[in-house]
């Protein structure tokens, strides 16, 4: 299970977009009707992951790493067994997959993601 996505939660998403565009050359594209911008960090043929930028729900800046899992229900059980907790229950993202957010015993929030099964 490896990191596949990050989310920067910013008190000022426009300022963050401006900074990361200038400092690192990242590009941003609005996704859906939400204040959520997909973030491209570089070409697909280079190592690294892409992510997203969104407003912070409590005006505190943070980064959330999301990990790919084969079975989201089993992953949440393992998190609980290891002393963590689910803080945002499973959410379906149409044509993308399912995601939930957890907190480890030290208070760090992270996501678990199960990709949608694609029809062949």
Image (cartoon, helix red, strand yellow):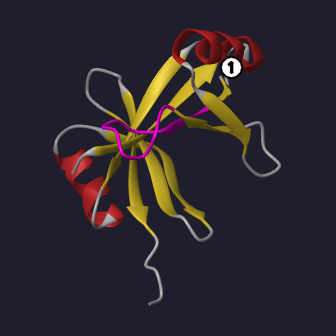
Residue 77 on the magenta span: no
Magenta stretch: give its range.
41-53
Give how far across and how far down residue 91 sits, in percent: 56, 59
The quadrant the C terminus occupies is bottom left
Our reading of the magenta stretch's main secondary structure is loop
Q: Residue at x 71, y 13 (%)?
A: 18
Give how far across and how far down residue 95 sits, in percent: 59, 71
Q: Is residue 45 above or below residue 28?
A: below
Q: How many marks?
A: 1
The residue closer to the viewer here, 75 or 28, is 28
Q: Is residue 17 above or below residue 101?
A: above
Q: Is residue 97 above or below residue 49?
A: below
Q: Is residue 2 left or right of residue 48?
A: left
- What element does badge 1 sit on? helix
Residue behind mark 1: 17
The residue closer to the viewer here, 5 or 74, is 5
Give how far across and how far down residue 49 sits, in percent: 39, 39
Q: Residue at x 39, y 62 (%)?
A: 114
Q: Residue at x 54, y 65 (%)?
A: 96
Give how far across and how far down residue 41 sits, in percent: 49, 31
The residue closer to the viewer here, 71 or 16, is 16
Q: Is residue 41 left or right of residue 76?
A: right
């Amino acid at each position: 299970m490896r990191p596949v996505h990050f989310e920067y939660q910013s008190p000022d998403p426009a300022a963050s977009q401006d900074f990361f565009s200038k400092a690192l050359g990242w590009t941003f594209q609005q996704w859906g009707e939400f204040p959520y911008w997909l973030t491209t960090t570089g070409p697909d043929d280079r190592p690294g992951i892409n992510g997203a930028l969104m407003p912070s729900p409590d005006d505190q800046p943070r980064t959330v790493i999301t990990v790919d899992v084969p079975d989201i229900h089993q992953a949440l059980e393992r998190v609980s067994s290891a002393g963590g907790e689910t803080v945002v229950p499973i959410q379906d993202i149409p044509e993308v997959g399912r995601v939930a957010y957890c907190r480890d015993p030290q208070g760090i929030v992270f996501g678990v993601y199960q990709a949608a099964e694609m029809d062949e």
